[in-house]
Image: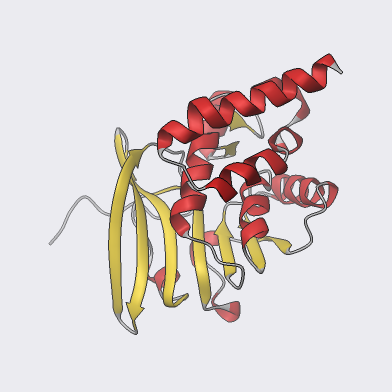
Amino acid sequence: MNAQIDLERARFNMIEQQIRPWDVLELDILELLNQVRREEFVPAEHRPLAFVDMCIPLLGSFEEAMRTGQCMLEPKFEARMLQDLEVQPTDKVLEVGAGSGYMAALLAARAQRVVTLEIVPELVKMARDNLQRAGVRNVEVREADGAKGLAAEGPFDVIALSGSVPEVPQALLAQLKIGGRLGAVVGGEPMMRATFIRRTGEAAWKTEQPWDTVAPRLAHFPEPSRFHF
């Protein structure tokens, strides 16, 4: 009983001390963070870190996970990204970088359907198992290179990149519906920007960068050349 009380206190503190101060103020999102059990998506050996303001390794050591992007992002990042993507109940969502499946579970609670792409086989299994145990039925986890997106099943209302990229590929922007939104972290250390791109026409997009952050790189997104001729 005491362990359960401690767990709920830690969850409450995460929401009040980390997430609200990051301007996540939508009450339904704050309630969702109470409902989706974050600790159930964290590897057992790291479960005590479930509500800590840090990236959590999913495979390998902390250093390896940060280098390869095989980690769970900070709670405040996931909550703010969810809020700013403005996911609607009729939306079809594409996520790039399934990780442990936690962000997909949050997206699925607000969307009609989520397809999440993951390039690492061990993480594909982890995400599938976690989502199944959590009773999430409207997410499909696929082993695929998310840098290419999923053109055959687009266009999508929302595309969420759960990690950072040097720049957003045009191939992904082309998979947005008109009115659709893409969220990503763009740039290089030490300064990256949360970037939200809305498709406003056949060949028109509007970009906003409302907050700064740092996130590990997603795999297979090419770094731009430093030389221009």
Residue 50 visible in this rendered orientation of the protein: no
- Rendering coords of residue 183 (x, y %): 43, 57
The quadrant in which the C terminus is found is: bottom left
Q: Could you tell me how many numbered marks the image carries?
A: 0
User: In this rendering, is residue 64 above or below 77?
Assistant: above
- Left or right: residue 166 versus residue 133 is left
User: In this rendering, is residue 31 above or below 178?
Assistant: above
Q: Residue furthest front?
A: 27
- Rendering coords of residue 223 (x, y %): 34, 51
Question: Image point 66% across, 59% down: which residue?
Answer: 108
Which colour scheme appears in the figure?
secondary structure
Q: Residue furthest left?
A: 229
Question: Image point 79% across, 61% down: which residue?
Answer: 137
Quadrant location of residue 60? top right
The quadrant in which the N terminus is found is: top right
Question: Image point 58% across, 24% down: which residue?
Answer: 13
User: In this rendering, is residue 162 above or below 22?
Assistant: below
User: In this rendering, is residue 147 above or below 73?
Assistant: below
Q: Residue furthest top?
A: 2
- Rendering coords of residue 9 (x, y %): 68, 22
Question: Image point 66% across, 34% down: which residue?
Answer: 58
- Left or right: residue 40 versus residue 157 is right
Q: Nearer the viewer, residue 90 or 178?
A: 90
Q: Nearer the viewer, residue 67 or 179?
A: 179
Residue 122 visible in this rendered orientation of the protein: yes
- Rendering coords of residue 195 (x, y %): 35, 53
